Amino acid sequence: MKLRWPSFQVPNGVRALVACAIGLGGALFFAQFLDNRHKLKDWVVFDLATIWTWQVFLSAALVSTGALVVHKLLPDRDRTRLETFAFAYPVGVVVFVLGMYLGGFLHLLGPVFAVALPTLMLAAGAPHARRAWQRARATGTFPRLSLTGLPLVASVAGLLLLGILYLGAMTPDAINYDAGWMHLVIAQDTAREGHIIGFPGDWVLNVPHLGSVVNTWAFIVPGLAIPQLRWMMALHTEFVAVVWTMVGIAAAARWLASREVGGTWAAYLLFPGLFVYDHNIGGAADHYMAMFTAPMLLATGRALRRFDRGACLLLGALMGGALLTKLQAYYLIAPIGLVGLVRALVLLIRRRRGDPDAPSLRAIAIGFGLAAAAAAVVLLPHFAVNTIWFHNPLYPFAQNIFSGTKWTVKDGGMQASMVLADWHSRAPAVLSERLARATELSFTFSFVAHYSFVGDLPMFGSVFTLALPFLLVIRNPRRLWLGAFIAMGAVFIWAFTYWVDRNLQAFLPVMVAVTAAILVRTWELGWLARVGVAALVFLQIAWGSGLYFQGADRVNAAIRLLRSGMDGRGRDTVAANRSQYVALGNALPPDATILMHNNHGTLGFNRRVFLDWIGFQGAIDYRLFKTPRDLYDRLRALGITHVVWVPFQRELSTKQEEIIWNLFAETLQNRRQFGEFTVAPLPAAPPPVEAPYQVLVVGVAGLPDGLYPIQMLSSTDLLPPTMRFHALPSKTAPSPGALLDEAKVVLMGGAAGLDPAASERLNRDFRPVQAAGGARILVRKN
């Protein structure tokens, strides 16, 4: 006899509910089991999940609002879906940053605002996104992934190396020097104060920093327990921006090639500098500016047709975003402007010849004006902050133009232009030589690096340069010539002005898109052409294979972090990064103000900071200090409560500073050590009032022997030789020892020599002062 189960149908909904209960029950059991071994709260994967949840939320908000703005400015028929996404993210970033400025001006920056602003942006664009979704469903035009052949190979390789790029950016170990000095410090300090602030203690923190405004969100968003997780959030935001940059590259490459070709975004593999330190994802601003550049090229193509108002407004907003990120955006804006003027002239000639479709002079002028106005609106909050804080919208530059500039020193404008913007990297001053060198560098920049951390090896751009001759054989290369001219124009302006290779990253996506489009169009010429393209690409990838793993230390740090979760040490591993900075800051009162002596990096202190490094700030001028008491009085006037320094780390900028600082440092008591940093409170009792120091110089290179007022020892090698102050002694003697009685301080170089009697008096009446400089410092005993 055969048994039969009762025949009845269980609804699918009930089956799904039971399956859900089984899965959740299993997960809860397994979680409890694992929690008994290693507490779940220590699993770094949950921190990463929190970070990525916020990243998805932010990206959705930016694209939602950005797509709405793009829809208002450009007709749907004038752009593909890929181009819409390419425009939407950077436009959304611009809207988000303006919202952050508004919240900052209203003193609203905090966890509530961090959630509210993206939520409002998501809600604003939701109706348009829903309508676009419904149209796509009705018409069956959802995008489909149908890559085959070389596009598939390129995309797979691109995704694999994108994973390596992510691992190299995942942990705080990826933070580079500049981010620990300025980019993330701006975000840290703004978040701490809860509103937009100026930075009188450090000039470079007051130049445009859109990326830092974006990263302020990482420092106020809820759910991140320790500072290092907020640094990781900022690095993840930058990584997401790089991913969206590749969307822009794909859209620009398709437009330039006039072909629907997949996989072009992966052409970034031909530019492996992205994986090398100082060009990699590290918390700096270069990749945020790069995010705007491929969309700028696309918007330029739209605007040049007829100078339509929407296209010009879009281009201006993108230009404003780029300029608000880094002033080096003018590298790309200048050639775009030149192309615009030439195109305007051509259209005006066509109109005079009777072409009814050519726009009028008025329409063209309005287009230019709208682009400039949109850029100005985006830049306005930054200019407003500098005007309010420093009475100079261009601060720290143009200090000699704006006579009422606050927080400046004598020759501050010159110092900013020669030290902050390092004179060593400037192009030659003579115009003819500058033009010749700029022309040469435009074609050799990718082969001969000016500085790098990989032994001056070529890191990126070589295929771009070597692919340009393909333009001579490609059919109908009009758009390609446009893209190549704009890219080469940006390279030329870089070579004409300031030779810092890292700044080439600012418009790298344009070079990538142009290169990808040229190679695609050349590939179409047949198998002989393909042999040439393949040889060029293979050689670059073979060479780049070593550069792709230059960040192995950062990748290993990510792997160590993921493995540490098995030992229950995930959070501890994260917290160990820059722990001495965080510990130092936590050891000080919340309202402490720090003097950071002769150093830059302050990420983790999370306290107000003044620097004292000449050429980087306008608050402390050692040229004015003739005794340690003068320095103390200035620090007290600035509200300095604590001094942080690395004892004897490096020689100071001037001999005057060497003397004043090292004698002042002897008065600092109650010292504590945090890693390499020494911290001490500013003493309640000031050093004694003394007469201005007279310094006897003996055997110091570049300084004749004799007696000097201390202010005469203010020359610095940070300035070009022609701008240095060359001192002469106020008094000399056949034997320097004869001046010993008049000296408060003796500065002795390696070639110093005194007669026996003077040497005996020196040893009896003076004591040595510890200093890092090459010259010995001795001060008269009290």
Image (cartoon, rainbow, N blue to C red):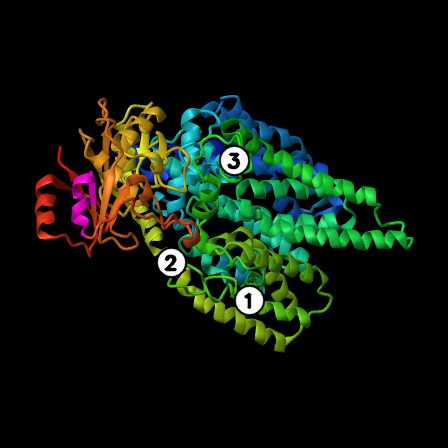
Classify mark 1: helix, strand or loop: helix
Relative side of 751 to 340, left or right = left
How far is mark 2 from mark 3, CA to CA?
Answer: 34 Å
Q: Circle 2 sits on which residue? A: 453
Task: Give percent across and percent down for residue 587.
Answer: 25, 28
How far is mark 2 from mark 1, CA to CA?
Answer: 23 Å
Q: Circle 3 sits on which residue? A: 58
Q: Kindly identify the residue that appears in the image at 68 percent across and 62 percent down.
A: 481
How far is mark 1 from mark 3, CA to CA?
Answer: 43 Å
Q: Which residues, given as a range, are shown in magenta?
A: 735-746
Query: Disc count in the image?
Result: 3
Q: Is residue 121 visible?
A: yes
Q: Is residue 27 visible?
A: no
Q: Which of marks 2 and 1 is in front?
A: 1
First along the sequence among labels 2 and 1: 1
Q: What residue type is labelled 1?
A: Glu
Classify mark 3: helix, strand or loop: helix
Quadrant occupied by the N terminus = top left
Q: What residue type is labelled 2?
A: Phe
First along the sequence among labels 2 and 3: 3
Q: Kindly identify the residue that appears in the image at 8 percent across and 52 percent down.
A: 756
User: What is the crowding at mark 2: few (fewer than 14 residues within 10 Å), some, or many (at least 20)?
Assistant: few
